[in-house]
Image (cartoon, rainbow, N blue to C red):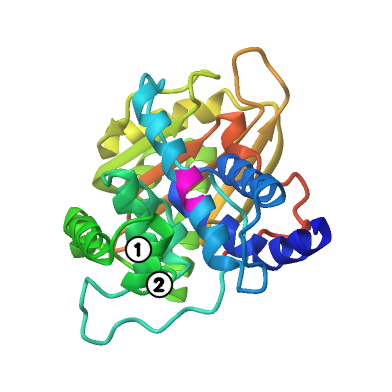
Amino acid sequence: MSMDVSAAFEHHRQFLWAVSYRLCGSAADADDIVQETFLRALARPPADRERDWRPWLTRVAVNLGRDLLRRRRRRGGYEGAWLPSPIEAEPPAHEPADESGNPAARYDRLESVSFAFLLALEALTPPQRAALLLRDVFDYSAKETARALGVTEANARTTHLRARRALAVYDQRRRPLTAKRQQAEREALERFLAGVAAGDVAAVEAMLAEQVRAVSDAAGEYHTHRVPVTGRTKVAALFIALARGLDDLRRVEIRVFNGQPGLLAERRARPGFAPRWVTLSEVDDEGRIVRIYTVLASRKLTSVTGDAHSESRPLR
């Protein structure tokens, strides 16, 4: 029987990881959820093992993810700002945008791992988050979503509707990750980093929107600014000051994280300072940077490989 379970689980592992990561925003937590789902499948498999395993496995993984989110919110006390885990991935083919411009249209697989989307999901309750992901990202019907959540179909529809309403602000401002936008973000990031490295305040400020916001997440593990820094002058000063203390860098690379260009940097180990970090940015329609996210917490970087040529984790 264990061989049958293993075969079924391997067939659906990638899908389960994709759901779990979007549900909790953490690669390490997604790994844990997938592993626990497998253990439960071994211990208490579904009664009818001739049917498709995906609905049963999805329900287990979604329940584990919702429980994890509830525990995380009950604990509270997170030190500093919370950011998702960056994941390395080759961007898949871009799915066609909704021609009517309807903000209620489904989110494609690429947009749904962007930092902007994952941060917007933090406004939802765990059931709302699960319902929206299943319905609007993974194309589940209301009936399939109800089964995965263990609720009635009417309840699933109501939960999904409330989730969409809670994301209204995001939907109004959303900017899907098109190839054009990815290229613009890469060019902006490269110019920004060049200006920071040169200590050119004017060049750095020119790359930043007036109300740019810089957020970092070290989870209390390393030194960093725990409160977001807002404003062109303050953000430029922050990064130029930080760059002056980085005379021991071992690696600086631009890679693709969460479908967006990002910086991976590594330095010699020093007490209290992160040995590596990932920085991503978002740009506006004029190509100016409006958000800068820096992730330093070691548990948040478990999905980031040290080898630039290592195989990327797929988004689909």
In the image, residue 191 lies at what x, y percent?
A: 48, 53
User: Could you tell me which residue is drawn at 29 percent across and 82 percent down?
Assistant: 98
Q: Quadrant of residue 222?
A: top right
Label 2 neighbour load within 10 Å: few <14, some 14-19, many 20+? some
Say whether residue 236 is left or right of residue 244.
Answer: left
Tell which residue pokes out farthest to the right in this image.
Answer: 3
- Residue of label 1: 146
* 201 to 135, vertically: above or below: above
Look at the image and give the residue range highlighted in magenta: 61-65
* 231 to 16, vertically: above or below: above
SS at circle 2? loop
In the image, residue 95 lies at what x, y percent?
A: 44, 80
- The answer to whether the residues at label 1 and label 2 have Cβ atoms under 8 Å apart is no
Quadrant where the image shows the N terminus: bottom right
Label 1 neighbour load within 10 Å: few <14, some 14-19, many 20+? many
User: Could you tell me which residue is drawn at 62 percent across and 41 percent down?
Assistant: 32
Quadrant where the image shows the C terminus: bottom right
In the image, residue 127 lies at what x, y percent?
A: 32, 49
Q: Quadrant of residue 131?
A: bottom left
Nearer the observer, 154 or 230: 154
- Residue of label 2: 140
SS at circle 1? helix
Tell which residue pokes out farthest to the top in this image.
Answer: 271
